[in-house]
Amino acid sequence: MQDKDAKIKKLEADVQTMRDQLASSKDKDAKIKKLEADVQTMRDQLASSKASYSEKERELKAVLDQLEEEKATSANLRYETEQSGEEQKDMLLELEGFRE
C-alpha cells in the first residue's frame, strides 16, 4: 500500500512537473511569437525608412540638379550682361566718333 501511495505521489509530482513545463513552454511560445511580431514590425519600419530615405535622396538630387541649372543660367546671364555692356560701350564710342 505504501508502495502504491509512493508511486501515486511520484506520478502526481511528474504530472505537475509536466504541467509546469507545458505552462513554461506556452509562455516561451508566446514570447517567441511576440518577438517575431516585434522583428516584423522593425522590418516594416526599416523598409519604410529605406523608402523614405530613397525619396529624400531623389528630392535632394532634383534640388542639386536645379541648383546646377540655376548656376548655368546665372553664368549665361552674366556673360550676356558683359557682352551687352561691351556692345553699349562700343556704341557710345561710335556715337562720340560721329559727334567729332
Image: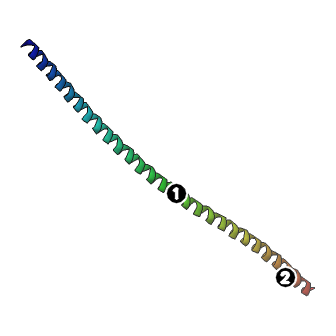
Label 2 sits on a secondary structure element that is helix
- In front here: 76 or 11? 11
- From what the image shows, is residue 30 above or below residue 21? below
In the image: residue 76, left or right of residue 64: right
* Residue 27 in picture, x, y percent from top left: 26, 34
Q: Are marks 2 and 1 in contact (CB under 8 Å)?
A: no
In the picture as drawn, the residue positioned furthest to the top comes out as: 2
Rendered image: mark on residue 70: none
Is the C terminus in the top left, top right, bottom left or bottom right quadrant? bottom right
Label 1 sits on a secondary structure element that is helix
* Residue 72 in picture, x, y percent from top left: 70, 68
The 10 Å Cα crowd at callout 1, few under 14, some 14 to 19, many 20 or more, is few
Q: Residue at x 35, y 40 (%)?
A: 35
Q: Earlier in the sequence, mark 2 or mark 1?
A: 1
Q: Residue at x 38, y 47 (%)?
A: 40
The 10 Å Cα crowd at callout 2, few under 14, some 14 to 19, many 20 or more, is few
Q: Quadrant of residue 70?
A: bottom right
- From what the image shows, is residue 24 above or below residue 96? above
Rendered image: mark on residue 91: 2
Q: Quadrant of residue 5?
A: top left
Disc 2 marks a residue whose amino acid type is Met
Q: Quadrant of residue 76?
A: bottom right
